[in-house]
Image (cartoon, grey):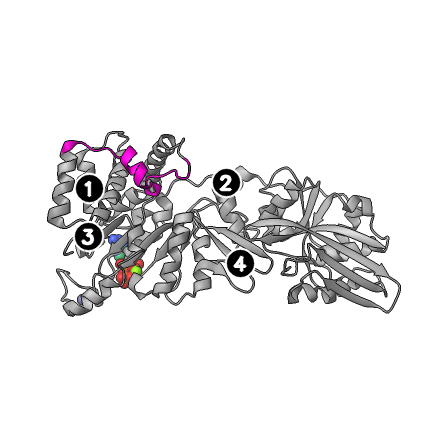
Amino acid sequence: MLARVLSSMTIGVAASIVEVEVDMVYGLPMFTIVGLPDTAVRESRERVRAALRNAGFKFPPKKITVNLAPANIRKEGALYDLPVAVAILCAEGIIDKEKVRDYMLIGELSLDGHVKPVRGALSIAAAARDKGLKGLFIPSENASEAAMISGIDIYGAETLPQVIEFLNNKLDMSPHKTDLDELFTRCTAYEEDLLEVKGQEYAKRALEVAAAGGHNLLMIGPPGSGKTMLAKRLPTILPDISLDEAIETTKIYSLIGGLNRDRPVFATRPFRVPHQTISYAGMAGGGNIPRPGEISLAHNGVLFIDELPEYRRDVLEVLRQPMEDRFITVSRVGATVIYPTRFMLVCAMNPCPCGYFMDPGRECLCTPLQIQRYRSKVSGPLLDRIDMHISLPPVSIREMNSGRTGEASRDIRGRVNKAREIQRQRYRDVKGFSCNAEMKSAHVNRYCRIDQKSQEIMEVAMSRLGLSARAYEKVLKVARTIADLDLREEMLPQDISEAIGYRTLDRKQF
Ligand SMILES: Nc1ncnc2c1ncn2[C@@H]1O[C@H](COP(=O)(O)OP(=O)(O)OP(=O)(O)O)[C@@H](O)[C@H]1O
Ligand SMILES: [Mg+2]
Ligand SMILES: [Zn+2]
């Protein structure tokens, strides 16, 4: 008496098929699960036993072996309860084996037979669809999320008896429908808006340029100048998120159980602020039960490193490779997990340890050595990946009290969208990048041609302001973006001058 039910497991953001095989023979009553189960899976025995009994079925007093295939990859979590319970009833002849073959089943069971939510529903639904199955039974809490995948019937399961009756043709259930357009519109709103930030026009312009070209940004300013406030609003002016991007981001949040009935999709660009004490695994991803790190939770959005000099160097080092590759590989038992990591990096710091260096209103109490030591913490490879650094002045009382509001995020985003579209068109035949910030040297030579006047401005800046050779390329990329925002193919001297202005840290003194 063998029965087989299809289920799934997530490996990174992808999901693959797991076959739940149940073999049942007469003998000393036993219930074993094999196939690299973790503790939660092993405890499945108790939940399945109770759920079946409470659903009115006699638990078979037989020797039951459950195998989760493929057996060489560790299975995690409680999501196999439902398929195991159904497979046992199949093996008993209580459920029709033929019908079960067309469906995938996923779900944790409570002792009374209710189906509880799982993680990774969206990836699992995609795997079930790709397998060509007719339908997927998923906890009802996860149904809206899973229904983002089209081409397969998604059934939201409430209880074990409900699923059994459906499989035995005693209950008609209609597939869960999600109105993607409605959901997408509802879930794309941001709580913050850039118009709430008063003054700081220079910083807002820099934020717009950064958003338009995908340039990483460092903000240097005294406490209370609005660095955190500005950074938090960067997602609101980034290009409109596409459905594909929203699905990618949702898959990641689905893995950490970060979604629910009210918010089944993640259609805003994420904003992540890892704490200064964050561990390597917290930043990069991994751990005993692998989960995506901050750099993946920021995928398609913004990673904000506030008070940059306070972070451990080794944790910041983690950022380098994934920023280049736009994914990170984490190893786990029997498999390698890949998480995407395409994010914009925004960092903030004070100009000195006390925060008031060069502040017109307050005296800085730091010694030159302290200041030098503080700033040296941000030099090196990470800084090398930041195209723009700007200084923020303190906000004046007059500005704070003025009733004037700035431009709304929506309008700025409109310009950013246009600039990005120009870049997409320009680079449509080039593999590997789609925005100015992602250009390599060869591309810069090709797409950032400047005239004699601009060349002269560059030379003056390099010698007089002490701009490094490394800064040269970054200035060109940012200038390219400034021209794109102005809907100009030709780069003008004014673009170069503005871009040089966004290189605060390259100056001998700032
Ligand atoms: N330009 C501004 N417009 C409106 N409010 C502002 C502005 N700048 C600062 N504020 C107010 O001051 C508070 C502190 O600002 P914010 O936390 O962004 O400063 P910060 O530069 O990050 O400071 P710190 O260095 O202490 O982290 C904000 O919550 C906001 O209420
Ligand atoms: Mg702050
Ligand atoms: Zn100081």
Q: Is residue 444 above or below residue 264?
A: above
Left or right of 170? Residue 374 is left
Residue at x 24% of width, y 29% of height: 490
| Residue 244 image label | 2
Disc 1: which residue: 498
Residue at far right of view: 26
Q: Which residue is nearer to you in this view: 317 or 259?
A: 317
Task: Say which label, 1 or 3, has the lower sequence index.
Answer: 1
Neighbours of disc 1 within 10 Å: few (<14), some (14-19), many (20+) = some
User: What residue lies at 38% left-to-right and 47% top-to-bottom?
Assistant: 235
Q: CA distance from mark 4 to mark 2?
A: 26 Å
User: Marks 4 and 1, how far apart in space?
Assistant: 44 Å
Between the C-alphas of marks 1 and 2, the distance is 34 Å
Task: Give the x, y percent position of residue 352.
Answer: 21, 64
Q: Is residue 445 above or below residue 198?
A: above
Marks 2 and 3, the one that precedes in the sequence: 2
Query: Which quadrant contains ligand 1?
Result: bottom left
Q: Which residue is mark 3?
A: 506
Residue tagged by mark 4? 331
Q: Amino acid at mark 1?
A: Glu
- Kind of residue at disc 2: Asp
Amino acid at pointer 3: Asp
Query: Quick check: 57 above or below 13?
Result: below
Q: In the image, 504: left or right of 84?
A: left
Earlier sequence position, callout 4 versus callout 1: 4
Q: Is residue 259 visible?
A: no
Kindly state the secondary structure of the residue where label 3 is placed.
helix
- 336 w.r.t. 473: above or below: below
Residue 442 picture location, percent across and down: 31, 38
First in sequence: mark 1 vs mark 2: 2
